[in-house]
Image (cartoon, grey):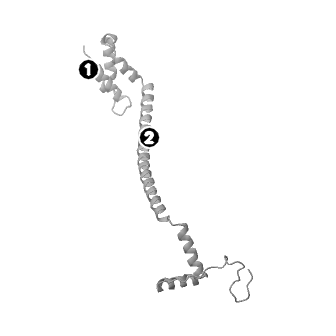
Protein backbone atom coordinates (compact mmCIF):
# COMPACT_ATOMS: atom_id res chain seq x y z
CA UNK A 1 0.00 0.00 0.00
CA UNK A 2 2.04 2.79 -1.38
CA UNK A 3 0.94 6.36 -1.19
CA UNK A 4 2.28 9.66 -2.17
CA UNK A 5 2.70 12.55 0.14
CA UNK A 6 -0.61 14.30 1.02
CA UNK A 7 -2.53 11.88 -1.11
CA UNK A 8 -5.21 9.39 -0.10
CA UNK A 9 -3.99 5.78 0.17
CA UNK A 10 -3.70 3.75 -3.00
CA UNK A 11 -5.33 0.33 -2.64
CA UNK A 12 -3.97 -2.59 -4.60
CA UNK A 13 -7.31 -4.35 -4.63
CA UNK A 14 -10.81 -2.92 -5.06
CA UNK A 15 -12.10 -4.97 -2.09
CA UNK A 16 -9.64 -3.17 0.18
CA UNK A 17 -10.97 0.22 -0.74
CA UNK A 18 -13.52 1.48 1.80
CA UNK A 19 -16.97 2.58 0.73
CA UNK A 20 -18.03 6.16 1.11
CA UNK A 21 -21.24 6.53 3.13
CA UNK A 22 -23.00 9.84 3.65
CA UNK A 23 -24.58 10.11 7.05
CA UNK A 24 -27.03 12.71 8.33
CA UNK A 25 -26.40 13.42 12.03
CA UNK A 26 -28.26 15.91 14.22
CA UNK A 27 -26.12 18.96 14.98
CA UNK A 28 -25.78 18.32 18.77
CA UNK A 29 -24.53 14.80 18.05
CA UNK A 30 -22.12 16.08 15.43
CA UNK A 31 -20.76 18.68 17.89
CA UNK A 32 -20.27 16.02 20.55
CA UNK A 33 -18.60 13.70 18.01
CA UNK A 34 -16.18 16.45 16.94
CA UNK A 35 -15.41 17.31 20.58
CA UNK A 36 -14.66 13.67 21.51
CA UNK A 37 -12.52 13.27 18.39
CA UNK A 38 -10.44 16.35 19.19
CA UNK A 39 -10.07 15.47 22.90
CA UNK A 40 -9.09 11.87 22.19
CA UNK A 41 -6.84 12.60 19.22
CA UNK A 42 -8.95 10.38 16.98
CA UNK A 43 -10.95 10.87 13.83
CA UNK A 44 -14.74 11.06 13.67
CA UNK A 45 -14.69 8.09 11.26
CA UNK A 46 -12.72 6.00 13.75
CA UNK A 47 -15.19 6.78 16.56
CA UNK A 48 -18.21 5.98 14.36
CA UNK A 49 -16.69 2.70 13.15
CA UNK A 50 -15.77 1.64 16.66
CA UNK A 51 -19.31 2.45 17.87
CA UNK A 52 -20.86 0.47 15.02
CA UNK A 53 -18.70 -2.59 15.68
CA UNK A 54 -19.39 -2.36 19.41
CA UNK A 55 -23.15 -2.23 18.78
CA UNK A 56 -22.98 -5.33 16.57
CA UNK A 57 -20.82 -7.27 19.01
CA UNK A 58 -23.03 -6.41 21.95
CA UNK A 59 -26.47 -6.51 20.36
CA UNK A 60 -27.86 -8.67 23.20
CA UNK A 61 -26.20 -6.68 25.96
CA UNK A 62 -29.49 -5.35 27.34
CA UNK A 63 -30.90 -8.87 27.72
CA UNK A 64 -27.66 -10.13 29.24
CA UNK A 65 -27.61 -7.18 31.63
CA UNK A 66 -31.18 -7.87 32.70
CA UNK A 67 -30.38 -11.55 33.28
CA UNK A 68 -27.23 -10.64 35.24
CA UNK A 69 -29.25 -8.24 37.42
CA UNK A 70 -31.80 -10.97 38.16
CA UNK A 71 -29.04 -13.41 39.06
CA UNK A 72 -27.38 -10.78 41.26
CA UNK A 73 -30.67 -10.10 43.03
CA UNK A 74 -31.15 -13.82 43.71
CA UNK A 75 -27.57 -14.16 44.98
CA UNK A 76 -28.04 -11.16 47.28
CA UNK A 77 -31.21 -12.74 48.70
CA UNK A 78 -29.38 -16.03 49.27
CA UNK A 79 -26.49 -14.17 50.90
CA UNK A 80 -28.88 -12.42 53.29
CA UNK A 81 -30.48 -15.75 54.22
CA UNK A 82 -27.04 -17.28 54.81
CA UNK A 83 -25.94 -14.33 56.95
CA UNK A 84 -29.05 -14.72 59.12
CA UNK A 85 -28.45 -18.45 59.41
CA UNK A 86 -24.81 -17.84 60.31
CA UNK A 87 -25.87 -15.42 63.05
CA UNK A 88 -28.35 -17.93 64.50
CA UNK A 89 -25.79 -20.75 64.38
CA UNK A 90 -23.13 -18.56 66.02
CA UNK A 91 -25.58 -17.64 68.80
CA UNK A 92 -26.56 -21.30 69.25
CA UNK A 93 -22.90 -22.28 69.36
CA UNK A 94 -22.11 -19.61 71.95
CA UNK A 95 -25.07 -20.69 74.08
CA UNK A 96 -24.03 -24.35 73.81
CA UNK A 97 -20.48 -23.45 74.86
CA UNK A 98 -21.80 -21.59 77.91
CA UNK A 99 -24.02 -24.53 78.83
CA UNK A 100 -21.10 -26.93 78.42
CA UNK A 101 -18.85 -24.75 80.57
CA UNK A 102 -21.54 -24.47 83.24
CA UNK A 103 -22.08 -28.25 83.19
CA UNK A 104 -18.33 -28.85 83.50
CA UNK A 105 -18.10 -26.46 86.44
CA UNK A 106 -21.08 -28.14 88.11
CA UNK A 107 -19.55 -31.57 87.54
CA UNK A 108 -16.25 -30.42 89.00
CA UNK A 109 -17.96 -28.95 92.07
CA UNK A 110 -20.05 -32.08 92.48
CA UNK A 111 -17.07 -34.36 92.14
CA UNK A 112 -15.06 -32.49 94.78
CA UNK A 113 -17.87 -31.87 97.28
CA UNK A 114 -18.64 -34.56 99.88
CA UNK A 115 -21.96 -32.88 100.77
CA UNK A 116 -23.23 -33.51 97.24
CA UNK A 117 -22.46 -37.18 97.56
CA UNK A 118 -24.24 -37.18 100.90
CA UNK A 119 -27.30 -35.55 99.32
CA UNK A 120 -27.38 -38.35 96.78
CA UNK A 121 -27.51 -40.91 99.58
CA UNK A 122 -30.54 -39.12 101.03
CA UNK A 123 -32.52 -40.11 97.95
CA UNK A 124 -32.24 -43.75 99.05
CA UNK A 125 -35.19 -45.54 100.67
CA UNK A 126 -35.95 -44.70 104.31
CA UNK A 127 -34.64 -47.99 105.63
CA UNK A 128 -31.16 -47.30 104.19
CA UNK A 129 -30.59 -44.28 106.46
CA UNK A 130 -30.85 -45.02 110.21
CA UNK A 131 -32.45 -42.42 112.49
CA UNK A 132 -29.23 -41.94 114.46
CA UNK A 133 -27.37 -40.98 111.27
CA UNK A 134 -30.19 -38.58 110.34
CA UNK A 135 -29.98 -36.86 113.73
CA UNK A 136 -26.18 -36.54 113.53
CA UNK A 137 -26.46 -35.08 110.03
CA UNK A 138 -29.04 -32.56 111.20
CA UNK A 139 -26.71 -31.46 113.98
CA UNK A 140 -23.87 -31.06 111.52
CA UNK A 141 -25.88 -29.18 108.89
CA UNK A 142 -27.93 -26.94 111.15
CA UNK A 143 -27.97 -23.35 109.79
CA UNK A 144 -26.69 -21.94 113.10
CA UNK A 145 -23.37 -23.70 112.57
CA UNK A 146 -22.72 -22.07 109.18
CA UNK A 147 -22.29 -18.38 108.46
CA UNK A 148 -23.86 -17.05 105.28
CA UNK A 149 -20.62 -16.37 103.40
CA UNK A 150 -19.19 -19.86 103.62
CA UNK A 151 -19.14 -21.93 100.41
CA UNK A 152 -20.90 -24.93 101.98
CA UNK A 153 -23.71 -22.99 103.66
CA UNK A 154 -26.10 -23.47 100.74
CA UNK A 155 -25.37 -27.19 100.64
CA UNK A 156 -25.85 -27.48 104.39
CA UNK A 157 -29.21 -25.74 104.08
CA UNK A 158 -30.24 -28.02 101.24
CA UNK A 159 -29.18 -31.06 103.24
CA UNK A 160 -31.19 -29.84 106.24
CA UNK A 161 -34.27 -29.37 104.10
CA UNK A 162 -33.97 -32.87 102.70
CA UNK A 163 -33.39 -34.42 106.06
CA UNK A 164 -36.39 -32.72 107.64
CA UNK A 165 -38.73 -33.31 104.71
CA UNK A 166 -38.31 -37.10 104.77
CA UNK A 167 -41.32 -38.97 106.16
CA UNK A 168 -40.96 -40.55 109.59
Label 2 secondary element: helix
Picture layout, residue 93 above or below residue 12? above
Q: Quadrant of residue 130?
A: top left
Residue 41 numbered mark, or none: none
In the current view of this chain or complex, which residue is farthest to the front? 14
Q: Nearer the viewer, residue 168 or 131?
A: 168
* Quarter assignment of residue 40: bottom right
Report x, y in % for residue 55.
53, 70
Locate the N terminus and report the quarter of the image it occupies. Answer: bottom right
Residue appearing at x 68%, y 86% in the figure? 8
| Residue annotated with mark 2 | 93
- Outermost residue, bottom side: 6
Q: In the picture provided, is 63 more to the left or to the right than 16?
A: left
Q: Position of residue 168 (x, y in %)?
A: 24, 13
Choose between 25 and 65: the one closer to the eye. Answer: 25
Residue 131, given in percent of the width and then of the height, sits at 30, 12
| Label 1 packing within 10 angstroms: few (<14), some (14-19), many (20+) | few
Relative placement, left or right, of 18 versus 33 is: right
Q: Position of residue 13 (x, y in %)?
A: 70, 77
Relative to 119, residue 10 above or below: below
Q: Given this view, does label 1 or label 2 mark the residue nearer the observer?
A: 2
Label 1, label 2: how many angstroms apart (C-alpha)?
A: 40 Å
**Label 2 Cα neighbours within 10 Å, binned few <14 / some 14-19 / many ≥20:** few
Residue at 42% of width from left, 47% of height from top? 87
What residue is shown at x 58% (from left), y 74% (from top)? 50
Residue hosting label 1: 165
- Please name the residue shown 34% across and 11% down the image: 128
Determine the secondary structure under disc 1: helix
Marked residue nearer the N-terminal end (1 or 2): 2
Amino acid sequence: MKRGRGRPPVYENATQQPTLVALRIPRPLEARLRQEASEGGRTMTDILLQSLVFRWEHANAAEELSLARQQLSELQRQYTVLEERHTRLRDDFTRAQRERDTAQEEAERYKNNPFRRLLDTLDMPRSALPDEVRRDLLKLCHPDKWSQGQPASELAHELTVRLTSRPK
